[in-house]
Image (spheres, rainbow, N blue to C red):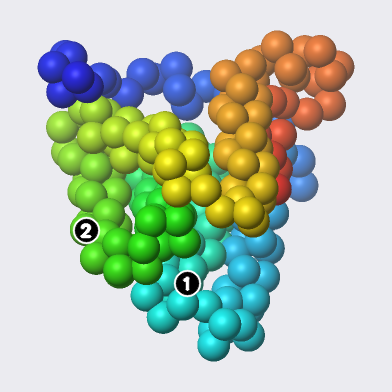
Amino acid sequence: ALFAQPPIHQSPDYHRFADTRALLGVPNFWNVVSNLPFLLVGLLGLAWTVKHMEKIERETRAAWLVLFGGVALVGVGSSWYHLAPSSATLVWDRLPMTLAFMAFFAIILGEHVSARAAKVALWPLLLAGVASVLYWRSTDDLRPYVLVQFLPVLLIPLILWLYPRRDSRAVWIALGCYVLAKLLELFDAPIYAALGHAISGHSLKHVAAAAGI
């Protein structure tokens, strides 16, 4: 259905954020520093994974490492993007994001469908994620990236329903944080105005997404 539609181009308006204040010599200060929770959560997650490696199913160990490694790199890549927002710098935001998305999806497959499904799917999923960003950058067509980012968000609730586990509450909370993050991103400027120009919706989006992880 997605590829039956015309190519989706990256709008220049995407790079125009509500809060462009510079502080301490850092442009777009709050959009930059609000990425620090990604770096913190990613590093803590890597430390947690290494510490509990023997308790994690062998087939999903790589996915956990990629997930938290990708999240830490989102903190770096997104900060770099927000210093000078453009399609060229946005690549470094989206590449690690797709790694984290795809690794998370593989973990869900492994914990709810089968461990073998995670092992078989992880590397093709990661390749698809990276390819979607490179395809967008070379063709200015976002359709593969949209598929990579949003199809798992639709499929994960379906998997949780079809393959239920008693301890899936955290996944639902993570999905809720993701939805909240997208809403904060969508209403970047209105939230910035409503909060008296204290902080913008996009900056809060980073915090909500990191909280989900």
Whether pointer 1 and pointer 2 mark residues with C-beta atoms closer than 8 Å, the reply is no
Who's the residue at 27% across and 29% down the image?
142
Is residue 71 something that shows in the picture?
A: yes
Marks 1 and 2, Cα distance to the nearest angstrom?
16 Å
The residue beneath circle 2 is 124
Q: Which residue is mark 1?
A: 65
Give the percent coordinates (x, y) of residue 139.
15, 32
Q: Is residue 194 left or right of residue 16?
A: right
The residue lying at 43 percent from left, 42 percent from top is 162
Type of amino acid at the residue the image marks with label 2 = Pro
Q: What SS does tag 2 mark?
A: helix
* Residue drawn where x is 66% and y is 51% of the image: 170
Q: What percent of the width, then of the height, locates residue 121?
A: 26, 60
Q: Assess disc 2: are there few (<14), some (14-19) or many (≥20) residues with their C-alpha within 10 Å of its C-alpha.
A: few
Res. 153 image quadrant: top left
Q: Is residue 122 left or right of residue 16?
A: left
- Residue 165: x, y in percent? 56, 54
The residue that appears at 49% across and 44% down in the rendered structure is 160
Crowd tier of the residue under label 1, counting other residues whose Cα lies within 10 Å: few below 14, some 14–19, many 20 or above: many
- Quick one: 104 or 161, which is closer to the camera? 161
